[in-house]
Image (cartoon, rainbow, N blue to C red):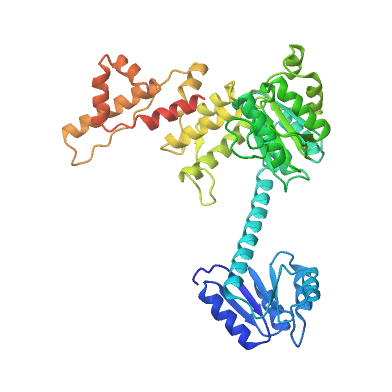
Amino acid sequence: MAETKGKILVIDDDPEIRESLETFLSFEGYGVDVADSGASGRAALDARSYDLVLLDLMMPDRSGLQVLEDLRRRDRETPVAVLTAYGSIENAVAAIKHGANDFITKPWNNEKLLLEIDKTISRRRLESENVHLKRALKQRYNFANIIGKSEIMTKVLELVGQVAQSRSTVLLHGESGTGKELMAKAIHANSPRAEKAFVAVNSGSLPADLLESTLFGHLKGAFTSAIQTKKGYFEIADHGTIFLDEISTVNLETQAKLLRVIQEKEFVPLGGVETVKVDVRIVAATNVDLRKLVEEGRFREDLYYRLNVIQVDLPPLRDRRDDIPALVVHFFTKYCRENEKFLDPEGRSRLRFVPEAMRLLLDHQWPGNVRELENVVERAVVLATDLDVPVDLLPDSLLAVSGVPIRRRVPPFERPAEASLFDIMDEIERRIIVEQLERCNWSQTETAESFRIPLSTLNQKIKRLSIEIKRKRDLAVGSRQ
């Protein structure tokens, strides 16, 4: 069946109207079904779904309003436009009260009718996509989907599950990489505000003046580059949730404005004089002790107490080692899907770390926490050539900290029957250079020094042997972050 712009049902007892609309809309790229009575229209609606219903108001067996009532009892979403030759205000009001989305009088202007149909179907599809997206996000950030079965994480998830349903401000405290933003999204997705906006602000990445404009918006001309009025994140997040990451980096002046938003639920945009009322839930996050900053005079005490209504401490990965195997499985599947490799028929990863490698993962201190573990697993997926991931595919930084000698395997070279001696020597040389580059974290300077050859000579060999340097170096650097 050819793809159409949308599926439309026309319910009208006039055969000329049905034929006219079917011909016109089909020519414009819509799929059209027709029904000649209220009963046949009801049967069509029971049989399938439509993007739009064009419904005649006056029919001999059942009125359009009765058909509309039946439809709205079981379907509040499908757009309905009522068609009638009786274009009175009373009929329009009655149709709208019964759930019609539009009211079109006969005879109509084809161009205007087509414009209204296009607009109605586009709006309905956008609304449907938003609903599906929000449902998917809620499922993704369901607390049950957060990897953490250790005793300490179970207690954290129980607390956050209770917190999510309230309106209270939450302060998430934990080291970098412990998943503070993930937890903030889960709080929002499981709260009564889930259908509204979740807005994340990385306070530490923005200069003070830009942060204030970002949070509270500005009027045109408020400062040199303010060429137009712009809403701030607090206004965008109205009735939703705003996540203030790295709250400890906010300067004292902006802290005062944050305090006012929390206390009064209002703020004044930059360059403005009128207050803007908002209802926003605040979830803040920090990797430092705010109480200590208060004592040092770098954080307002009154703001601290306003933010710290409910504090959730996210444990570092070294304190929840029981969760590491499950996290490894999760990240293996995630990156195997992204790279479309090593997947079983159900779409799950078939990769596994050899026992020695898994022992190193369990013993590692994980200064970068879950984010560091994710980088390690992603790197293993990219470099793996076999289902059993060996120790030497772990990053050098992890091996060095663990005291494991860094050994890089050179896969055995299977000589093609037609390969010449020069081909064999080139392949052996290429593998030796790649192995040494890996040991030196893809630093060409260090590699050249280790080979005791000029850097220019090494670069010539790299070019001649088609060794990919930039992509490999980026991967090595990424694994150390």
Q: Residue at x 83, y 33 (%)?
A: 264
- The quadrant in which residue 230 appears is top right
Please state the horizontal and vertical placement of residue 381, each as a whole percent of the image. 47, 37
Please state the horizontal and vertical placement of residue 463, each as a whole percent of the image. 26, 30
Please state the horizontal and vertical placement of residue 175, each as a whole percent of the image. 65, 23
Total marks placed: 0
Q: Residue at x 77, y 83 (%)?
A: 62
- The quadrant in which residue 422 appears is top left
Relative to 472, say whether 138 is above or below.
below
Relative to 343, say whether 388 is above or below.
above
> Is 233 left, or right, of 446 in this rendering?
right
- The quadrant in which residue 116 appears is bottom right
> Is 104 left, or right, of 114 in this rendering?
right
Residue placed farthest to the top in the image? 296
Q: Nearer the viewer, residue 111 or 403?
A: 111
Q: Nearer the viewer, residue 328 or 196?
A: 196
The reply to whether residue 232 is visible in this rendering is yes
> Is 132 left, or right, of 58 in this rendering?
left
Q: Nearer the viewer, residue 270 or 140?
A: 270
Q: Nearer the viewer, residue 53 or 1?
A: 53
Please state the horizontal and vertical placement of residue 415, each as a whole percent of the image. 24, 37
Q: Residue at x 69, y 19 (%)?
A: 288
The reply to whether residue 143 is visible in this rendering is no
Relative to 120, say whether 271 is above or below.
above
> Is 394 left, or right, of 113 in this rendering?
left
